[in-house]
Image (cartoon, coloured by chain):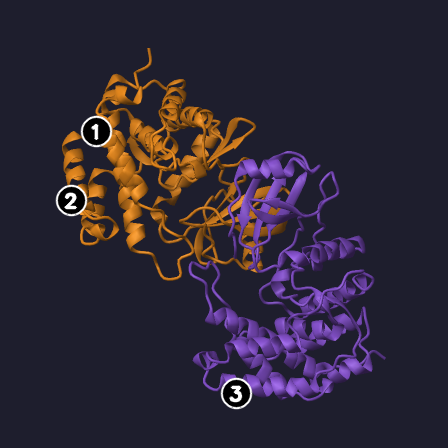
Chain colours: A purple, B orange
Amino acid sequence: MAVYTEIQVEDLIEFLANYSIGTLLSYKGIAEGVENSNYLVHTTLGTYILTLYEKRVCCDDLPFFIGLMEHVAGKGILSPLPVRTRDGVALGMLSGKKAALVTFLDGMSVRRPDAEHCRLLGAALAQFHLAAQDFAMTRPNALSLDGWAHLSHGVRARADEVQAGLQDFLSQELAFLKQAWVNDLPKGIIHADLFPDNVFFLQGKVSGLIDFYFACSDMFAYDVAICLNAWCFEVDGSYNMTKGLSLLAGYQSVRCLTAAEVDAFAVLCRGAALRFLLTRLVDWLDVPEGALVRPKNPLEYYKKLRFHQTMHHAQDYGLTPCV
Amino acid sequence: MAVYTEIQVEDLIEFLANYSIGTLLSYKGIAEGVENSNYLVHTTLGTYILTLYEKRVCCDDLPFFIGLMEHVAGKGILSPLPVRTRDGVALGMLSGKKAALVTFLDGMSVRRPDAEHCRLLGAALAQFHLAAQDFAMTRPNALSLDGWAHLSHGVRARADEVQAGLQDFLSQELAFLKQAWVNDLPKGIIHADLFPDNVFFLQGKVSGLIDFYFACSDMFAYDVAICLNAWCFEVDGSYNMTKGLSLLAGYQSVRCLTAAEVDAFAVLCRGAALRFLLTRLVDWLDVPEGALVRPKNPLEYYKKLRFHQTMHHAQDYGLTPCV
């Protein structure tokens, strides 16, 4: 949850005067998003989400994120549509922060997805991949192999505080991934953070994908692996094969994975697990003074990574290419 | 800000099935209220606020609060109207907590009220006093003279950590108030916490009074004193006489203060300042582990109390009874 920046009503009214969205009726800080401050804004013409970008979302990347949201919404993906001012600008300044207004999406995220949710999510992810394929901008993935090496180096001295032997484990896994990682799989724009909080459902359908602030250019199948990790493990750390099969089948109902993607899948799952293990470890070891967010336990991803180390082939996940 | 209890979507759908308010479309935890968890709930039929009562609001008092909200809303006060289930029940259970659903009110609170806001607030307070006058239930004010003595005793050992000499100051003020306090002024239900966060404005009018969880039976003029303290001081601690006069005139435009109320006003202001000084001191000295709320500085109310100690007569505030 996060409301870092308080907005004064006078400032908001001045900000909204640039838009054609009616008169302000109310606004509430909402407990959503970790990186930014989010407000639900209610006007005479509708409901909107106002986001103030806090330091961790780099300002240089905002045109990419805004552009991507506009692009995929225009392709029919149910995702927040940035609202432009009368002058055609989608990114403004409010309370000293970069700010954007997007349309509000109905729907609820699920905390404990079932197999059907996983199937729907898989299909929505593939639809997003296809919709974003002709988006003109690119953004390198700072959280891939090189990024992991950098993060691992940063936590080296303190990883064993969290679990004995963790630093050695990280070094070995990184060494494995350096030689096993592939780079020649189908690429495009990936969401890279499509966790259950970022997917809304309504009446048995996906009603919204949100939070595009980790989106970047990378391999599609890596995004599938991120989702498998986020959606198909139980609270006790066990992998749910039914959910995994369902997610993969949902994805392939829209976009077939190539033979090369299938071959690489087990390695991609390990990389995807290491990525979240490392960033959570960084957050865990460095909770800022007065933080409103309790960091997520990195060991959840340690367990997932350990599981994937026992899986050597795509068949172990029940994954086969489309027929 | 506060979202202490996370609600699972399945639980919420089951809870809402008892009401005739349509189908759930979305719900968001909002950063509002300190004592409870609040969610903005959007259904096919409208927008509602769902409150989960956390430990500090005593369950025994909930029927009083709910009943009061229904009573004053029925009298035309713009305040949240509790929604009843099809079985006529306004208080239910959700996620293991007592829970109530109320109508959503448009409008925005102001952080730095001007004199006109103070006038409107004063009038709204008086309207509330009159509207609640024939409410059948009562609730003793646990935060009056006896309560202050109890709180003061509790912080005795540590008050000087916050400011040197504060414990002596508290003892002396309490001794003064014990002899100077009056009890025979016009009474009824008071809001007792009508701070700027709890008053919404829209298009130059009060559009909502919220947060009735400190409401109790006490002297009307004491409620006026609470508001004067909350609305008419500047950030630097100085009293703004223009705002004070405006608040008092607004109040008296609806309900005349009696000569006895006017006479007692300076003492009531001191009591009202001591009450918030003490409760803030308690919160300041005892921040629970993992708290999401940063406690408010008690010394803001120390300064206000020091100011009131220099004011001896209602005339010092420019206050006179209605002609």
> Which residue in the structure is indicated by mark 2?
B168
Q: Which mark is residue B201?
A: none
SS class of the residue under badge 1? loop
For marks 2 and 1, give the CA distance: 25 Å
Judge the density around disc 2: few (<14), some (14-19), many (≥20) Cα neighbours within 10 Å.
few
Query: Looking at this view, is B286 or A311 the one in front?
Result: B286
Query: Looking at this view, is A173 or A114 the one in front?
Result: A173
Residue at (45% x, 63% y) in the render? A288
Residue at (36% x, 47% y) in the render? B296
Disc 3 chain ID: A
For marks 3 and 2, give the CA distance: 59 Å
SS class of the residue under badge 3? helix
Residue at (72% x, 81% y) in the render? A265
Q: Nearer the viewer, mark 2 or mark 1?
A: 2
Question: Is residue A236 visible in this depiction of the protein?
Answer: no
Disc 2 chain ID: B
Figure check: B208 above or below A135: above
Question: Is residue A273 visible in this depiction of the protein?
Answer: yes
| Residue B80, horizontal then vertical, whole percent | 49, 37
Q: How many marks?
A: 3
> Which residue in the structure is indicated by mark 1?
B183
SS class of the residue under badge 2? helix
Amino acid bearing label 2 = Asp
> Which residue in the structure is indicated by mark 3?
A168
Disc 1 chain ID: B
Judge the density around disc 3: few (<14), some (14-19), many (≥20) Cα neighbours within 10 Å.
few
Amino acid bearing label 1 = Asn
In the drawing, does residue B87 fall left or right of residue A274? left
Do the residues indicated by labels 2 and 1 lie within the same chain of the protein? yes
| Residue B140, horizontal then vertical, whole percent | 27, 38
